[in-house]
Image (cartoon, coloured by chain):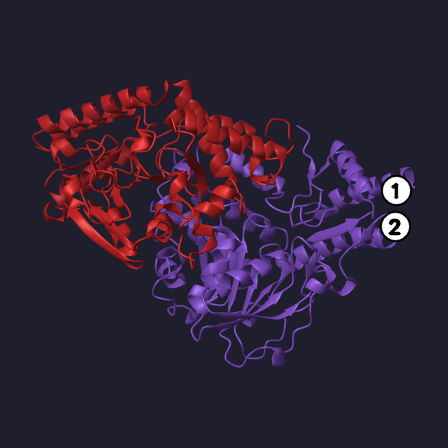
Chain colours: A purple, B red
Amino acid sequence: MARVYNFSAGPSMLPLEVLKTAQKELIDYQNSGMSVMEMSHRSPVYDAIIKETEADFRKLMNIPDNYKVLFLQGGASTQFAAIPLNLMKTGKADYVVSGQFSGKAFKEAKKYGDAKCIATSEDKTFSYIPEITPDMVREDADYVHVCYNNTIFGTKFPEVPNVGDKVLVADMSSCITSEPVDVTKFGVIYAGAQKNMAPAGLTVVIIREDLMGNAREDIPTMLDYKTMADNDSMYNTPPCYAIYIAGLVYKWALKNGGLEAMKERNEKKANILYNFLDNSSLFKATAEKKSRSMMNVCFVTGDADLDKKFCKEAAEAGFVNLKGHRSVGGMRASIYNAMPIEGVEALVEFMAEFEKNNK
Amino acid sequence: MARVYNFSAGPSMLPLEVLKTAQKELIDYQNSGMSVMEMSHRSPVYDAIIKETEADFRKLMNIPDNYKVLFLQGGASTQFAAIPLNLMKTGKADYVVSGQFSGKAFKEAKKYGDAKCIATSEDKTFSYIPEITPDMVREDADYVHVCYNNTIFGTKFPEVPNVGDKVLVADMSSCITSEPVDVTKFGVIYAGAQKNMAPAGLTVVIIREDLMGNAREDIPTMLDYKTMADNDSMYNTPPCYAIYIAGLVYKWALKNGGLEAMKERNEKKANILYNFLDNSSLFKATAEKKSRSMMNVCFVTGDADLDKKFCKEAAEAGFVNLKGHRSVGGMRASIYNAMPIEGVEALVEFMAEFEKNNK
């Protein structure tokens, strides 16, 4: 078996060690006589899995006791509706539009109230993160929504935006668990798990307890955070297997030094790639330096045909899914936690060779 | 490894053959160099998986071309809201309440319009399916909603209810693919996949094309059937791995004779169990004969302590998850497609022995 280096933006690489454990346990989980896929979600054996997964996630992210962790379905896209349906009390919310997904979140919020875009980087194809200051936020806004890392454009907030005393809501789908974050600075953090934590089909929400219980009356029950929290994410059947894999990934991250170590490794990987790009005569990073993502490194040659040739030859050499998002073109190397440093080193070597051959 | 006979109501047993294939392919799917869990949902290799899964499902269920198949998330519980949000045009819908889940669906629909319960079996603890005739349906109702098989109470509609020319919507979570159904008699069929088709986290919707496109303006985008259909279930990242397993299960069912063969086998299994119950001096089936489910066989001894003892001893003997739903107590043997006949035969043998020892 030859594992490829998979630079997919999501779903994406999982630690090989995790996959090996999953494979070993697939038919018979720890002498239970069944697969995790076959377990009643209300059985003691599964209960232990989900409780341990939550405990490990709390430890990894250093989540305070006054925050609930919810294991949901529907992806971040479902949260785009759930956020306003749960949090819009006065009916006003402020959005920072720094990419396609934050744009979608903003559009969805407008269905439910007075959502305002207080800053955007659309003027420069979302190649940077706009600066946010407390005075930009409306006095009576219920929350400020940001997308912390923009997968498509390869940008990330360089620091937690200052929204004064307002509730900060962040979509962290593509950077969660990539480095430590101070959870207390956020009201809600949510993330589709398929980039850095698990296979697709699991959405994790971290929410400060006092923000629950104010949902609109006509909210679909399954989108009501209070209902999900009161039932420990088991109002209905949760995505059990994806939660189990997330649990294995959290254990792997803890064993490998937690989020401080993840950050160090991720910075190292990103630096290798950005340093190469900054010194290349062929390739060019597209995101502004101060807004660069550690997870999604976007670059171009400036020639669409050459970009295509690069992606093709890279794939043949075992570097797959390097094609940029269909809306922007170019290339994107997504280097989440599970991508080993050797993968990035090998990619840069390949890029140098390609550059030499395509001058 | 000793596999147990798992009578869980859901998530539940999967065919061993399917689990073995999944295990073999877990780290490297067909020389792609990656797990299905790691694949971009927009990659050619995954595209082939989801397309083949849909094609096999259509073949298995004999789904006409004017019906769309959607692979969604959020379970049947999310559909309880999606159905009225998508289908209530005049604002009226009629519901048959034959158990807990149809009750939840009814309650959810009331949030969005004039939902009326036109028949219920609550008077006898949902132990039967109420008869439905076209004159019970309101002239201007947009649809009639039923739960086709009631997992908790072990009942099933003996035939497709006659709702005249009204659109029939059916939650088939616990009986889908257990026997052939005439899809053309339904406007929408939906099902959580975790009972008869896949691990939890996948919801399948079969919808007649002309019923889409009338959703309320404030519907969460992710609940809008038209959006999901227009994007071939890829408006956002679908639950890729659960879809892959569903695909393996559909292939297994087709290889084993399709739904006619499934029905024959399921009838045989149910008959073994019901025949035993009808002749037992200790155990008693709780559902009325004409409404009995082939999938969920509910029974009691009439003594809660003895029920408990039975479940305990059964589990020790390798017959697990026989405890009835927490809301009704007693026992429930869920015998979905993947439960082999030998499992039911062995259970009945064990029950006979228990009966002898507990006179």
Residue contact at pointers 1 and 2, CB within 8 angstroms: yes
Q: Residues within 10 Å of mark 1 (few under 14, many from 20)?
A: some
Regarding residue B6, the answer to whether it shows in the image is no
Task: Please give the name of the residue rendered at 39% of the width and 23% of the height, measured from the top-left corner.
Answer: B253
Marked residue chain, label 1: A
Residue on which disc 2 sits: A280
Towards the viewer: B73 or A208: B73
Task: Please give the name of the residue rendered at 19% of the width and 51% of the height, measured from the top-left corner.
Answer: B117
Give the vertical position of B96 relative to A205 (above or below).
above
The quarter holding residue B205 reads top left
Q: Earlier in the sequence, mark 1 or mark 2?
A: 2
Residue on which disc 1 sits: A355
At label 1, the amino acid type is Glu
The quarter holding residue A32 reads top left
Regarding residue A307, the answer to whether it shows in the image is yes
Q: Is residue A142 left or right of residue B179?
A: right
- Marks 1 and 2, how far apart in space? 8 Å
Towards the viewer: B129 or B166: B166
Quarter of the C terminus of chain A within the rendering: top right
Q: Are marks 1 and 2 on the same chain?
A: yes
Task: Please give the name of the residue rendered at 42% of the width and 66% of the height, measured from the top-left corner.
Answer: A86
